Image: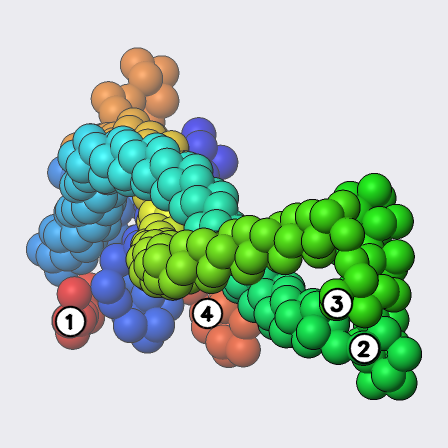
Amino acid sequence: MADKLKEQLREVVVALNGADITNEIEKMLSIVLPLSLGEYSDQRHRFQQQVVDGIEGLLGQVEASLVQDVAEKKAARDTAAADKPSKDKDAAVAADRLTAKVAEVHRLKVALADIATAFRVARSALTDAEEAKVVDGQKAKEAEKKKADFVLALADLHALKASAPDDKETKQKASELMSLLKKYKFEESMMIALPAALAKAPDARGQFDLMAINQLEGEIDKLIVEMDGILAAALPGQANCDAAIKKAQNHLADMRGKQRAAAKAFDVASNEQAECEATSAAAQKAVKDIVNASKKLEKALHNAEVEVELYVQGPKETFQALQQHVTPPPAPEEEEAEAAPVAMEVTPRKGTPTKATPTKENIELPVAMTL
């Protein structure tokens, strides 16, 4: 019976460690507790009852603190649970924005590729237009050179028609004329008949000789007219080439502007996609964090509720039992004797001097405590 009482008193002392009291009062209570709460209620002195009442108040503080801890943990758990829907919504919105932005970036990437292709086509078209102008201009230059040769050949032919064949200058012109005819591939029969005709004096030439000379003269005139036609046609052709080049230049400039705008839009969208990815990742992390926090808070709440239950079923019930226990009736064979108080062995705190356990005789002295 004495061992049970000691264990009950020790349980109450341990519970008092949770009260907001100083070390001095705690030490004092550990000493006076066996001499007050350990005494039967019907045999307590009023000072002993004051101590018991004070302990009851302190234990009430302990219980209130435990209950408050439960309330705080429940509020934290409920707050986390209430925040989760908004976190889920934020994560869903962030995910939708990311999906939309990824689609936009892909669309802009495709558009940029298409514009880049169109830009290359426009640049190639400008190159073709410039080359066409060069080719067209080359035809005009060739026609102009041919016309000059044909005009010179016609002048030489006119001079040879009236010149003596033995003249040195006449021979030189005849040689140059034949070289030109060979260069431009005149009809072979004409080139065979012409030297013989030009080798004769003007008055010695027959009908066949004159026909060969006149035929050559007519052929040269025809070629000069043909070159004039080419030169006349070259003027609008060059103008058309210039117009085509201008058009190609404008189109290329337009494509260059569109390409720059598309590249800028793609860069902006890519940066926004990176921001959306970061936002979505943060939102997903927030959901994960609040789930983990809710689990920890739920566990902490459960532990706090268990602490309250253990306190109520442990120290509180023990205190109430000791607070109300009365002197048991004596056995029929036993003599009535005054119950002696049970001294409790108290383990002093580290560094606390050991004090003698008070006896029933000195508990009658006034006790001054601030509980």
- Quarter of the picture containing the C terminus is bottom left
Query: 14 or 310, which lies in front?
Result: 310
Among the two numbered marks 4 and 3 on one chain, the one whose residue lies closer to the N terminus? 3
Q: Say which amino acid is labelled 4.
A: Ala
Q: Would you name the residue on which mark 4 appears? A: 356
| Residue 106 seen from this side | yes
10 Å crowding of disc 2: few (<14), some (14-19), many (20+)? some
Among the two numbered marks 1 and 3 on one chain, the one whose residue lies closer to the N terminus? 3
Q: Nearer the viewer, mark 1 or mark 4?
A: 1
Q: CA distance from mark 1 to mark 4?
A: 22 Å
Among the two numbered marks 1 and 4 on one chain, the one whose residue lies closer to the N terminus? 4
Residue 53 point in image, percent of width and height: 12, 51
Q: CA distance from mark 2 to mark 1?
A: 158 Å
Q: Would you name the residue on which mark 3 appears? A: 202
Q: Is residue 15 above or below residue 74?
A: below
Q: Secondary structure at mark 3?
A: helix
Residue 24 point in image, percent of width and height: 32, 74
Among the two numbered marks 4 and 2 on one chain, the one whose residue lies closer to the N terminus? 2
Among the two numbered marks 2 and 1 on one chain, the one whose residue lies closer to the N terminus? 2
Q: Would you name the residue on which mark 1 appears? A: 370
Q: Secondary structure at mark 4?
A: loop
Which residue extends farthest front? 203
Q: Nearer the viewer, mark 4 or mark 2?
A: 2
Q: Would you name the residue on which mark 2 appears? A: 164
Identify the residue at image location x=45%, y=54%. 229
- Rendered image quadrant of residue 200: bottom right
